[in-house]
Image (spheres, rainbow, N blue to C red):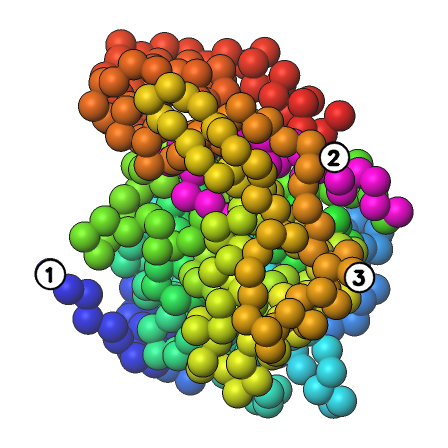
Amino acid sequence: MEREPLSTNRKALRINLDLSVYGTIAEIGGGQEVARQFFQAGGASGTIAKSISAYDKLFSDRLYNQNKSGKYVSEGRLCKMLETEYHELVSVLSSTRERPTLFFAFANTVTTLNYQKDNYSHGWVGMRFQSTPKRDPNEVIFHVNLLERDILLQQQTLGVIGINLIYACFNYRKNPVDFIRSLMDNISNDRIEVTMIRMHGPDFDYVDNRLLGVQLVKNGMTQAMMFDRHGQVQQPSDMLYKKNVLLFRGAFRPIHNVGFDMLKSSYQIFKRDEDYDRGNTLALCEISINNLLRKGEIDERDFLERVDLLNGMGQHVMISTFREYYTLVEYFSQFTLRNLRIVIGIPTFMKVLNDIYYKDLKGGILEAFGKIFANNVKVYVYPTIQAVSIDTREATGDLLTSRDILLPEDQQDLYHFLYKNRKIIDITNVKKEWLYISSVNVLRMIREGEPGWEVMVPKYIEKQIKEKGLFGYRSTGGQADRKQRREYTELIFL
């Protein structure tokens, strides 16, 4: 049955009337909007044991950071708030409550719009709660961007999403899809963006947080989700802060030798950049949500297979809703990046240069290029070959590079300007003997049991596909070769 959303007031009242639920609400920076919702609904004395708002930074440090200063709007501060408030709540009340009680601690730490309206409005929201009396607690945390341009509206939105979280924890924890969707009850997508979410605890042992991230993107709650090389969900602004980013877009079903060579050869170019710093540079493989759809629904297993393979190759992964490259670059422009380098093959690059894709922009291709080739952005172009033979596994003829592209006369001057100023850079040190490989053929051969695909993919990928039966391959299963994983990571980053 389809879930019927309740009003915010109705949710708060239902929680207040549930005498088994009792807890603390701690809010920093955005007012006491969640507590206010409970008090306005009526009967809050049966729900709220304590409400606190530590506005002064010294009080916040003393309460939640053991007298050590730090970032006040951060995941670390939120986790410390949840830990401190929940521990105090249980320590004081667990032995005095007459009826079985589900204890909870809700917390948020938020920076809302300032007077000048020129700051980054965002925050961390979380909940630690019991689903069974005297049982270990569960925990849910997420990050939000506040999109409204009015502080009172932002505060109201925080109150609504806070109530939605508390209600979901006690009513939707057995259904992650409903849990995710319910966070936006009574809120439109233009008011707030949920950029990451994580769940853990005894009731969430079955939950894969990567799939929660997919649900956020699928339901329009955020434009993109990022996972580090260990498969952990990360907040984009933290993950990308002052980083050099090498971005490679693809379907990765699976990543093959050409894709691996694109990463490796482009990284070698990036290493010669004057701003390069290995410890501050990350490669990011981006998958569009459109590549995950099958008959209109997300193919979750297929997605996890791709992420696992890319993580095994030492890659960070991003899933997004973006179609055009200019929208993808525009998304990255909101973060404090050092440099962004985009890796792209000739066939795709020729589509990027086609003005038919920019008819909806007022400035047409000129506007699109202004966004794609921003000050800190360069495009690394991987060549293709004139002729290939899948039967003989040969790539014949000359390489086709960005200099060989035929453009309309009215675009040539602009293109030459970009090329001359090294906004477009050809990747020259490539494995020409691999250029006969295509993703379509590799996937077809795997599914049909046709021999020969093994030489088209890295050894680690071959082993994983065979051991785990990925992409339709039939196998007996097995364990991953960790040494192989390290070797491929070193080939890219050393």
Name the residue furthest left.
Answer: 1
Q: Tell me the kind of residue under disc 3.
A: Asn
Sequence order check, earlier mark of 3 and 1? 1
Image point (33%, 36%), residue name: 440
Q: Tell me the kind of residue under disc 1.
A: Met
Q: Nearer the viewer, residue 222 or 7?
A: 222
Using the numbered discs, state the Cα–Cα distance from disc 1 to disc 2 in whole angstroms: 54 Å
> Which of label 2 and label 3 is nearer to you?
3
29 drawn magenta: no
Which type of secondary structure does the marked residue at label 1 adopt? loop
Report x, y in % for residue 102: 38, 51
Q: Nearer the viewer, residue 183 or 424?
A: 424
Q: Give the label on residue 20, or none.
A: none
Report x, y in % for residue 174: 27, 47
Name the residue furthest right.
Answer: 274
The answer to which image quadrant residue 18 occupies is bottom left
How many circles with numbers are drawn on the protein?
3
The segment highlighted magenta reads 248-274
Which type of secondary structure does the marked residue at label 2 adopt? helix
In the rendered image, which residue does mark 2 sit on? 268
In the rendered image, which residue does mark 1 sit on? 1
Using the numbered discs, state the Cα–Cα distance from disc 2 to disc 3 in whole angstroms: 20 Å
In the rendered image, which residue does mark 3 sit on? 421
> Which of label 3 and label 1 is nearer to you?
3
